[in-house]
Image (cartoon, grey):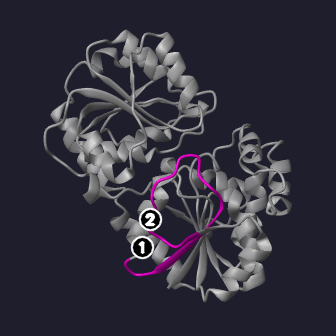
Amino acid sequence: MKVLYLLFDYPQLTETYIETEIRALSDRHRIEIVALRKPNVAYASDWPLRYCDDVERIVEYARDGDFDLIHTHWAFMAEVVAEVSRRTGLPWTLRGHAFDMLWSGDLRTRLTSYIRTGSRVRHVLDAVLASAATGPAHLRRAAPLINDDACLGVLALPFGRHWLERAGVDPRKIHDCRPVMDYAMFHDRGDNGEAVMNVGACIPKKNMEDFLQLARMAPGPDYHLYAVGYQRDALAARNARLGQPVSMMPPIPHRAMPAEYKKHRWLVYTSSPRIGTVGWPVAVAEAQAAGVGVCLANIRPDLADYLGGAGILFDSVAEVVDVVRGPVPDEMRERGFEQAAKSDIQRHRTVLENLWNAA
């Protein structure tokens, strides 16, 4: 099939799950990408890509490109994609994630800051922005579009099903799917280094200040923070004021990350319980596949299902001070390999492909 990926921003270094999906599917399908905006921190992409924030031009491109269907990521893109679908007759699919499923009052702020003044997709997204001021109405707006026959289905993290159904999405349209990662790329049973790491977009919901505090409370191991883009400079300044307890790592291409994981004994993944929109971070599965022990902020009950006993949930980084100074238990490490394999894109690519075949 020839598939048009209509994305918000691409290729964004903090959204490599999109690249993992495309790379896995490109062996059987022809994929071209249209992104509404350029990323905050980019990586090299191997796929045909153009930027366009004009719905008219996107529709023209979709009509002329001999595409079979459209695929997108994040529920707030449903109105844009449904508009293109309606005018071209192309069916579409959507993969949801966390911040677009778990309501947060900062969604409207984030979208408003992302979409520059004068963008010609604003007339499609304005209603989403307005509804976001009052709560998870963006999902309620997306529900009838997903329920329409033109939408073949939505892939959602297991906890996302509740929010989609609550918004009015037909349960038959929802397909539970774990975060996608390339297990073969990260799987390595060799010995690991002794450093401690954290990784992700440098935004408030990741609460990376806690990682700085942990490094001060538990000196000894080296602490490496792979904080990407956004508020990185402010965090680096705070790290400097604290005496540089953490090494701020430069942006690393995703394909080079397996070697970075192997330098570490523990991943301490911090999150803000106040914002609460961190989902099931793909970095957790990547770390588990690389033999790294995982400590994960305990902001919701569903995270225990994701860890599957192959990690430690913490309410405060003070709880893992002694943990990160010691080795990863062998049983936890072995269980981590098994748990990470459940997120292998090769295991569940058929969930998406079966929807596409329905076209």
Where's residue 6, x and y in %? 63, 68
Where's residue 258, x and y in %? 28, 47
Label 2 element class: helix
Q: Are marks 1 and 2 in contact (CB under 8 Å)?
A: yes
Residue at 75 percent across and 76 percent down: it is 57
Where's residue 350, x and y in %? 41, 73
Location of residue 198 with respect to 133 vertically, above or below = above
Q: Quadrant of residue 215?
A: top left
Left or right: residue 100 compared with residue 80: left
Residue at 43 percent across and 41 percent down: it is 251
Q: Amino acid at mark 2?
A: Glu
**Of the pair 63 and 57, the residue shown nearer to us:** 57
The secondary structure that most of the magenta stretch takes on is: loop
**Of the pair 84 and 247, the residue shown nearer to us:** 247
Left or right: residue 110 compared with residue 285: right
The CA span between labels 1 and 2 is 6 Å
Left or right: residue 31 compared with residue 191: right
Which mark, residue 21?
2
Reading the image, the residue beneath label 1 is 25
Mark 1 crowd level (few <14, some 14–19, many ≥20, 10 Å Cα): some
Label 1 element class: helix
Q: Amino acid at mark 1?
A: Leu
Where are the magenta residues, as a range? 27-49
Magenta stretch holds residue 48: yes
Q: Quadrant of residue 320?
A: top left
Where's residue 93, x and y in %? 60, 71
